[in-house]
Image (spheres, rainbow, N blue to C red):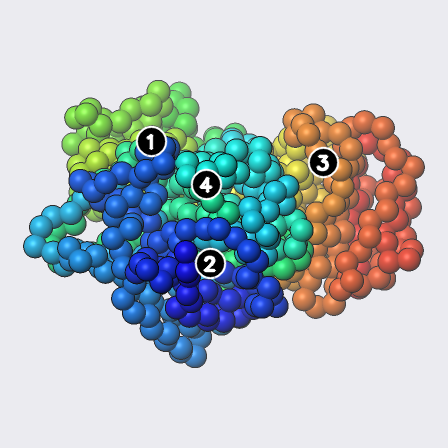
Amino acid sequence: MAIEEISRIQVGDMILVYEQETDFKTAGFYIIPADMNSDDNKKKFYRINSLVQLKLVGDIYPNCYGHGSSMRNGESSNLLDYDSQTVEKTDDKVIVKTYLKDSRGYDVVHIVTYYNGDLSFEMKNVITNNSDKDITMEMISSFELSKISPFLEGDGPDSLLVHRLRSKWSHEGRLDTETVEDLQLEPSWSTWSVSTERYGQTGSMPVKKFFPFAAIEDTKNQVLWGVQLAHEASWQMEIYRQDDGLHLSGGLADREFGHWLKTLKPGQSFETPAAIVSTCHGGGIDMICHRLTQAGQKYADKAPESEQHLPIIFNEYCTTWGCPSHDNIKGIVEAIKDKGFEYFVIDCGWFKEDGIPWDISMGDYNVSPTLFPEGLEKTVALIKENGMKPGIWFEIDNIGRAAKSYEFTDHQLKRDGFPITTYSRRFWDMNDPWVKEYLNEKVIGTLNKYGFQYMKMDYNDTIGIGCDGCESLGEGLRKNMEASVDFVREVKNQVPGIILENCASGGHKLEPLMMSLCSMASFSDAHETEEIPIIAANLHRAILPRQSQIWAVIRKNDSLKRIAYSVANTFLGRMCLSGDVTELTSQQWNVIDNGIKFYKEIAPIIKYGYTHRVGPKITSERHPKGWQGVIRVGENGEAYVLIHMFYGDIPEIISIKLPKDCPLNIHTVYSDTEVNVKIENGSLIYYPTENMKAVAVKLK
């Protein structure tokens, strides 16, 4: 079959390629690194797949054994004909719009937006029903990448890797790498039947089993393609193969995967969630992840001014365990004042009634007269008087079973007519005007009344497949979570300069949309476990380190080595301390103080830099063996290396080859004791002597 190019457009260091078969009007799309612009014509047999994947109710389902495992390439996609294309350039961005038309009156605009200076671009689709009849979608993609990899002959056997980031509670971001062959994504002998790997997440915790992320690597040519989805509800990714062309698409979870249907009346439009897309030549998985997460810098740079030097947080949760009071906060503030903390967060429990645990009583949000007999005013004033910005915790969307508002079922999400109920929670209908007014009073009203400058937004259960009230359960979920995100925007509008922390049982909302609205995120609910540095390093592939708030919980019985280990964990992101700070010795505080000083020195490197992760594979996170090394190279001619020793045999020497752009002079070393570390022949040499020990080295 003959294929011709529609256009070839450069954005940054990437080339967008639009093409179509000469006998049809179906348009396809792929991307390549700009430095390989002339190398993408290897011999392949592949069919053009529409750059917008769409399935409408009533249209023919996919052929080739695809039905039931994929909704791609059905009649709806194949009837989308290429119409035209425009390129718009402004001072800060390039927008490429590709117009597709279905002769029945359905129009789709495929939109690529590239922001000048970024290492990625955004992609989304907008469908409009210009017919005189309702249409119902059961699938529409946010992105479709075809022809991976165009630099390989044929189907490129033994050359393609699929990278995913797995996630579970307190174990976020584990890299999962498989070959295309192991996933049975080789084409069949006839190139007729299709194979597919569809995965994702159903519910209101978008990072519960997988991150909304995929990367595919051509190991022979060292080229990678990567995608993140910016979406708060059910989503899917799909790797698809029929012939020599490997495809990657994704967006909203479809009818089969996410119980989603959406009806458009004549004249109505629908916009998909945005996808962040990139490609690179060289650098491996860390490079493609860096390019994707770098897209968040433009939003983080617009965070409140205090956020720009990455200040240190104290959160009292692991000190009071959900029972904060004016008296215990007073003792904490006295212990930590003048230590360099700039934010003090009052976590969950400030509202709890006597004898009722905090985790089943959220929702009413009345200040406890037992814990705060003079109200929160006095406590907030105390925090401010000691030079810190006060913060407070809310679980905005959910209601605990012991709260009075738990019985307000007329304003809660339902499925099959019943309130969606787990053993501890129900869920507000975030589109209900009464709920909006209630939360405006309880949340925004509290922030403004007491002068809080920081809010930790938690979310500790999932809605599941969806809720009543729309064409489908999945659409009910999507609209509810869209309203939830809009409430976050309303907080920012009504409380100018508020610092927002994104938390969902730790790290279950670490996706680009929420991260673009928040200053930072709770990296995990791993509060004081030994695997914290592993999780924190994992998350460099998913979010910006400057937005990754990492716990260092210090106990009065901790050894100096353990304290340095815990403090050093926070060098992988934002430092957040908690624990027995009112009962520590001067020796223990000395280790913490030195860590705070070191953190402040490397904060510019955490803020803007590139991460190299080195060391043996850690197979068990709960029982880690071996060691882990993280090199973070900044933009200011500085870098730091962080080494964590785990269990097992201690090597005589650890040699870490430093990147070419890394400085080679040791400036500062942080640990609990003096350590033997040096630079030799472009490598950092460390002579370890103990397990479960951390060493950080700043290079200048």
Q: Relative to 555, is 259 on the left or the right?
A: left
Which quadrant of the rendered structure holds the C terminus? bottom right
Q: Which amino acid does label 1 sit on?
A: Gly
What residue sits right under mark 2 in the picture? 30
Q: What element carries label 4?
A: loop
Q: How crowded is mark 3: few (under 14 residues within 10 Å), some or many (20 or more)?
A: few
Ranked by sequence position, the earlier of labels 2 and 4 is: 2
Residue occupying image coordinates x 47% and y 44%: 243
Q: Relative to 49, is 282 on the left or the right?
A: right
In this view, which residue lies farthest toward the left? 132
Q: How far apart are marks 3 and 1 (CA)?
A: 36 Å
Q: Is residue 244 above or below residue 93?
A: above
Q: Is mark 1 on a helix, strand or loop?
A: loop
What residue sits right under mark 4 in the picture? 191
Q: What residue type is labelled 4?
A: Thr
Q: Which of marks 2 and 4 is in front?
A: 4
Ranked by sequence position, the earlier of labels 3 and 1 is: 1
Q: Which of 677 and 443 is in front in this view?
A: 677
Name the disc covering residue 345, or none: none
Q: In this view, does 295 lie above or below 464?
A: below
